[in-house]
Image (spheres, rainbow, N blue to C red):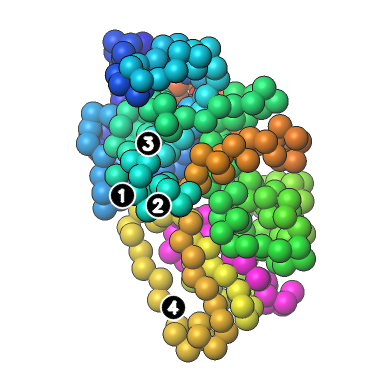
Amino acid sequence: MKAAVVTDFSKPLEIQELPVPRPGSDQVLVRMETSGLCHTDIHAAHGDWPVRPNPPFIPGHEGIGRVEAVGAGVPADLVGRRVAIPWLGSSCGHCRYCVSGWETLCESQVNSGYSIDGAYAEYALAYANGIVQVPDGVTSVDAAPLTCAGVTTYKAIKVAKVVPAERVAVFGVGGLGHMAVQYARVVGGFVTAVDIEDEKLELAEELGADHLVNAAKEDPAEAIRRVGGADVAVVLAAKPGPFEQAFRSLRRGGRLVMVALPADNATLAVPIFETVLGGISVIGSIVGTREDLSEVFALHAAGRTKVIAQTRDLADVNECFDDVVNGRVPARLVFRF
């Protein structure tokens, strides 16, 4: 099988011919149909974060395909079913987080395309307790970005507890941001979209944003406060500046939801006086659970969301990384096998 492999953090990915893996206990073998390109894959390939993966490895955690074989302990009727391989590859299933519906916080979790090989390949192994079935009403091209960009922003809106008529400011309209705009609208929020590119702001408007702010032309915090301030600010831009801007944009009782992970593990200085007197909450939101992903698929199958994606060939993976890093992609790229 062909696979895109990270051999060294300082080198481009290599397209290699590798043996098709065999599923072990509790695993399934998936023949991939599509795999989305998430910015996390780029961070993984460059070793940007404090906890690094170990080369050589295969990135990818937005994989969609059909189960071809199962290992010991896995029901045979999974064969032939179309499934998603998400970031949360597996969790222990019995810690306090797993049993309370927060398996994404499990300290024993493994992560697809990071601590275990992922979906940038014609075949991929996955743990049966980590995959999520994809309904017929969702195409494989759409399902790939929904498996991370979709479920991550859906969870962010969920943990922010947005209620109808609240203003939600989305900082960064791209692969994740274009989904966040839609989920905020699904729950009845008024949406302010913040970006530095007019084309992405135009996309946000097409998807239902009520208020647009170009952060390259004006201070977004001031612009948002002119319309009353944000009840919720979701930060999806992986640079330190937008986090500070988002905090300043909040009105009293506001919630800052931190999602993006800057490469340099930056810090945010939160003013204690304003935070306490203003009743401000700062929330970290990390992807979503299997149940969250099932809900994301259900919403999409019902026509409530739209995925903006371009398909590419896996052989062009390094050029695709460059396009994402340099902002040449409207929203999401998807490798089609």
Tally the marks.
Answer: 4
Q: Quick check: is 127 in the magenta stretch?
A: no
Q: Quick check: is 241 in the magenta stretch?
A: yes
Camera-nearest residue between 193 and 88: 88
Q: Look at label 1 and name its amino acid.
A: Glu
- Which residue carries the number 4 mark? 270
Among the two numbered marks 1 and 2 on one chain, the one whose residue lies closer to the N terminus: 2
Residue 156: which quarter of the image? bottom right
Q: Residues within 10 Å of mark 4 (few under 14, many from 20)?
A: few
300 versus 82 height, above or below = below
Q: CA distance from mark 4 to mark 3?
A: 34 Å
Side of 215 relative to 53 (left or right): right
> Magenta residues?
224-242
Between disc 3 and disc 2, the foreground one is: 2
Q: Look at label 3 and name its amino acid.
A: Ser
Discs 1, 2 touching: Cβ within 8 Å: yes
Among the two numbered marks 3 and 2 on one chain, the one whose residue lies closer to the N terminus: 3
Side of 141 relative to 302 (left or right): left
Between disc 1 and disc 2, the foreground one is: 2
Q: Secondary structure under badge 2? A: helix
Among the two numbered marks 4 and 2 on one chain, the one whose residue lies closer to the N terminus: 2
Q: Look at label 2 and name its amino acid.
A: Tyr
- Which residue carries the number 3 mark? 90
Q: Residue at x 55, y 41 (%)?
A: 291
- Which residue carries the number 1 mark? 107
